[in-house]
Image (cartoon, rainbow, N blue to C red):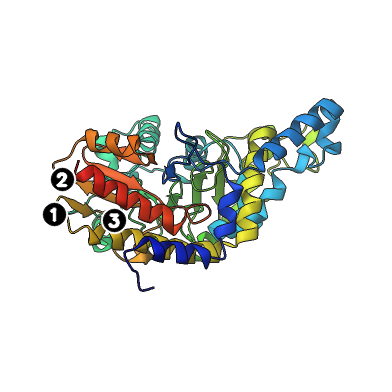
């Protein structure tokens, strides 16, 4: 797309955007005067779909009307409600429905997956992660090492950017793997880095790990609903994600989990278990030994929170209508427009940390504001912009294609320009 730095161009793109009608199906925060804010923070919390209230109210109504019999008689029977979401979620992460389960929250799922897939030995016990992984991932990995009586100083290998660089290089990852291949038991990588916005080449990473017979897991917290991870085809062993960012399911909502089909039928793989992971054909017999469901459902612990599932179902229904391929196409154009407008500012105090190639990023751009502090971000907030500040000097901006517009992006850059010259 050839971009033009004008409001008229942005408005024309919105008029011609087949996905633009979805914008009206979301609630936007408003300023004191009632006008909508410029919301570019879907990488932290997605906006609420207007229909979500109806989805939640339906569950409350069914609970009121049926009590326990809502498990079978609710409009969406509670016994199988999580199963209904496997197929639409599988389309988003590139998996087979039987490889996907909606359960728990992200870090809980990460721990459950490491119980099954991190199998340290005396010589092969190290875990490789990116150096600036989201803190929860690092905490989880370190605690798993300690659980196995391994000092994180000995057990953790960090994939770092080179000196004076912000992005990780895949050749450096491959060099680490080559050097430590006989020591690494697990590679655990965030698909899209929360700080820089760099989207890693997951196929390249997974294939190299498979070559060395190393288990590979992925955190899709900033990937699910943003990029196309193609989990089944690349052969990742497992992946985990949240649904409250790009998937708009509500604050602190339920997470998702992928287990590759080569593992899902195993009855010998180690796992922490609970009754909802038991084969549903005999789950309610109650007095038999654990027989895992032969799908990713076999990693469930408890029956799912129905109100949280309602928010997830609401958003996934919108994703189904929009089509993820179309959303990804718009995302590339929308983020490209943001990049173009920032470059047009021609301000030497601004640089973009995120890769320039659309294949190496999702919708987020991490904008470094040199010699600035949080006061600049506060000015933006006062002007009705909802974005995200990360210390020491980065503003994360994420135009989500399901509800953000080209005019949003144009207006954001205009307000940023004003703040820079105040």
Q: Nearer the viewer, residue 82 or 343?
A: 343
User: x, y (%) of residue 14?
Assistant: 49, 62
Residue at 36% x, 56% y: name it.
410
Q: The residue tagged with tag 2: helix, strand or loop?
A: loop
Q: Quadrant of the C terminus?
A: top left
Compared with 62, 344 (above or below) is below
Provide the residue designation for mark 2: 370
The residues tagged by marks 1 and 3 sit, at their Cα atoms, a distance apart of 16 Å
- Disc 3 secondary structure class: loop
Is residue 122 found left or right of 48 in the rendered image?
A: left
| Quadrant in which the N terminus appears | bottom left
Crowding near the residue tagged with mark 1, few <14, some 14–19, many ≥20 C-alpha atoms within 10 Å: few
Q: Which residue is mark 3?
A: 354
Callout 1: SS: loop
Task: Please determine whether, in this image, residue 168 is positioned above or below residue 271.
Answer: below
Please indicate, yes or no, whether residue 305 appears anywhere in the rendered image: no
Where is residue 179 drawn, in percent x and y? 23, 57
Would you say the residues marked 1 and 3 are in contact, meaning their CB atoms lie under 8 Å apart?
A: no
In which quadrant of the rendered view does residue 135 lie? top left
Q: Is residue 319 left or right of residue 155?
A: right
The span from disc 3 to disc 2 (Cα, nearest Å) is: 15 Å
> Gap between marks 1 and 2, in whole Å?
8 Å
Q: Callout 3: few (<14), some (14-19), or many (20+) C-alpha neighbours within 10 Å?
A: many
Whether residues under marks 3 and 2 lie with C-beta atoms below 8 angstroms apart, the answer is no
The answer to whether the residues at label 1 and label 2 have Cβ atoms under 8 Å apart is yes
On the rendered structure, is 124 left or right of 403?
left
Q: Nearer the viewer, mark 3 or mark 2?
A: 2
In the picture shown, does residue 360 fall above or below 48?
A: below
Looking at the picture, tell me which residue is in the foreground, 211 or 307. 307
């Amino acid at each position: 797309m050839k971009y033009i730095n004008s409001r008229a161009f942005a408005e024309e793109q919105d008029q011609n955007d087949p996905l633009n009608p979805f914008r009206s199906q979301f609630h936007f925060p408003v300023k004191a005067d009632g006008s909508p804010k410029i919301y570019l923070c879907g990488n932290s919390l997605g906006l609420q779909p207007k229909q979500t209230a109806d989805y939640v109210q339906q569950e409350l109504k069914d609970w009121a009307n049926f009590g326990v019999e809502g498990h079978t008689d609710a409009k969406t029977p509670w016994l199988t409600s999580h199963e209904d979401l496997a197929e639409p979620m599988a389309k988003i992460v590139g998996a087979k429905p039987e490889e996907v389960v909606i359960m728990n929250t992200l870090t809980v799922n990460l721990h459950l997956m490491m119980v099954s897939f991190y199998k340290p030995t005396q010589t092969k016990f190290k875990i490789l992660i990116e150096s600036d992984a989201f803190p929860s991932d690092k905490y989880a990995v370190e605690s798993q090492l300690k659980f196995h009586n391994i000092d994180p100083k000995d057990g953790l290998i960090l994939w770092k950017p080179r000196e004076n660089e912000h992005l990780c290089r895949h050749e450096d990852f491959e060099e680490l793997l080559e050097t430590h291949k006989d020591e690494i038991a697990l590679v655990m990588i965030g698909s899209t880095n929360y700080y820089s916005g760099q989207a890693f080449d997951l196929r390249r990473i997974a294939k190299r790990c498979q070559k060395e017979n190393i288990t590979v897991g992925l955190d899709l917290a900033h990937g699910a609903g943003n990029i196309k991870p193609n989990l089944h085809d690349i052969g990742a062993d497992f992946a985990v994600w949240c649904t409250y960012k790009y998937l708009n399911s509500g604050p602190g909502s339920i997470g998702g989990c992928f287990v590759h089909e080569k593992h899902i039928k195993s009855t010998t793989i180690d796992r922490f278990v609970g009754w909802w992971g038991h084969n549903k054909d005999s789950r309610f017999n109650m007095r038999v030994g654990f027989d895992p469901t032969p799908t990713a459902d076999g990693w469930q612990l408890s029956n799912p929170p129905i109100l949280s599932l309602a928010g997830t179902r609401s958003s996934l229904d919108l994703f189904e209508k929009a089509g993820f391929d179309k959303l990804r196409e718009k995302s590339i154009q929308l983020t490209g427009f943001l990049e173009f407008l920032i470059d047009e500012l021609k301000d030497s105090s601004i640089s973009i940390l995120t890769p320039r190639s659309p294949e190496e990023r999702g919708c987020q751009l991490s904008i470094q504001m040199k010699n600035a502090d949080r006061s600049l971000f506060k000015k933006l907030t006062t002007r009705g912009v909802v974005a995200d500040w990360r210390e020491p000097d980065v503003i994360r901006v994420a135009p989500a294609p399901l509800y953000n517009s080209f005019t949003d992006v144009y207006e954001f850059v205009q307000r940023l320009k004003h703040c820079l010259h105040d």
